[in-house]
Image (tube, grey):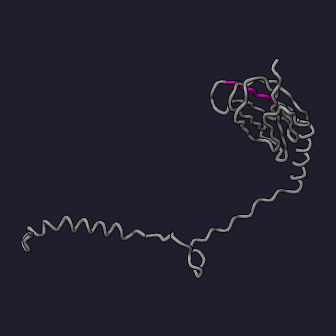
């Protein structure tokens, strides 16, 4: 039994009171969200509305026509896709594509570009593991083929402009195809 009065009663209740006070202060800033059920039909618009999106940039009609002409030229230079194709891409200059897995063996990479003087093609493993690494400076306006022996595993093909003055309407394409083993 606790005696009332005196300093003995204060010593017993002081820690309990301090703990209760801390809990009350900590919970005072908390808010309980009611995410059960559907919101009421009379609920107004959300207080936090998203800012309107800025308009998407539009492409200049002359630039779009130049890019389309260059893409058509690259498709013509590359020709029809082979049946033994591992990966290919066609688009603007400055891209990277990775194939998840290539079987070890001989391959042919074909690349073509239009709308810029030249591009740099790199074929390599996507990480720093040892393996084949091919770098080829390609003069645009014709297709270039190069034989390459790949190790098994993922392979990355990257094409970037060789100069800083690449035309924004320039286009490039490549094909990586498996060659029959000799």
Q: Which residue lies furthest to the bottom in this view?
A: 42
Residue 17 image offset from top left, x and y in percent: 21, 68
Quarter placement of the N terminus? bottom left
Viewer-closest of 136 and 8:
8
Q: Name the residue: 88% across, 57% down.
A: 61
Question: Where is residue 41, by image quadrant?
Answer: bottom right
Q: Which residue lies furthest to the front in this view?
A: 37
Residue 39 image offset from top left, x and y in percent: 56, 75
Q: Is residue 136 magenta?
A: yes
Query: In this rendering, is residue 147 above or below 171?
Result: above
Residue 7 image offset from top left, x and y in percent: 8, 69
Residue 75 image offset from top left, x and y in percent: 90, 40
Q: Residue furthest top?
A: 182
**Number of numbered tags placed on the structure image:** 0
Relative to residue 83, is residue 9 drawn left or right?
left
Question: Where is residue 122, by image quadrant?
Answer: top right
Question: Where is residue 22, by image quadrant?
Answer: bottom left
Q: Name the residue: 80% across, 32% down.
A: 176
Q: Name the residue: 71% across, 64% down.
A: 54
Q: Is residue 89 magenta?
A: no
Stretch of the chain drawn in magenta: 131-137
Q: Name the residue: 70% across, 24% down.
A: 151
Relative to residue 113, is residue 103 drawn left or right?
left
Quarter placement of the C terminus? top right
Viewer-closest of 99 and 146:
99
């Amino acid at each position: 039994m606790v005696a009332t009065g005196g300093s003995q009663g204060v010593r017993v209740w002081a820690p309990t009171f301090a703990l209760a006070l801390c809990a009350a202060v900590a919970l005072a800033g908390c808010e309980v969200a009611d995410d059960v059920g559907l919101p009421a039909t009379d609920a107004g618009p959300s207080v936090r509305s998203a800012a309107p999106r800025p308009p998407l940039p539009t492409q200049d009609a002359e630039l779009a026509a130049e890019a389309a002409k260059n893409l058509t030229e690259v498709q013509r230079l590359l020709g029809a896709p082979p049946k033994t194709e591992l990966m290919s891409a066609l688009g603007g200059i400055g891209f990277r594509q990775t194939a998840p897995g290539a079987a070890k063996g001989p391959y042919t990479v074909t690349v073509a570009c239009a709308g810029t003087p030249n591009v740099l093609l790199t074929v390599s493993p996507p990480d720093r593991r040892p393996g084949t690494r091919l770098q080829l400076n390609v003069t645009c306006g014709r297709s270039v083929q190069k034989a390459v022996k790949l190790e098994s595993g993922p392979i990355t093909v990257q094409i970037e402009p060789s100069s800083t003055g690449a035309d924004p309407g320039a286009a490039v394409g490549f094909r990586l195809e498996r060659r029959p083993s000799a």
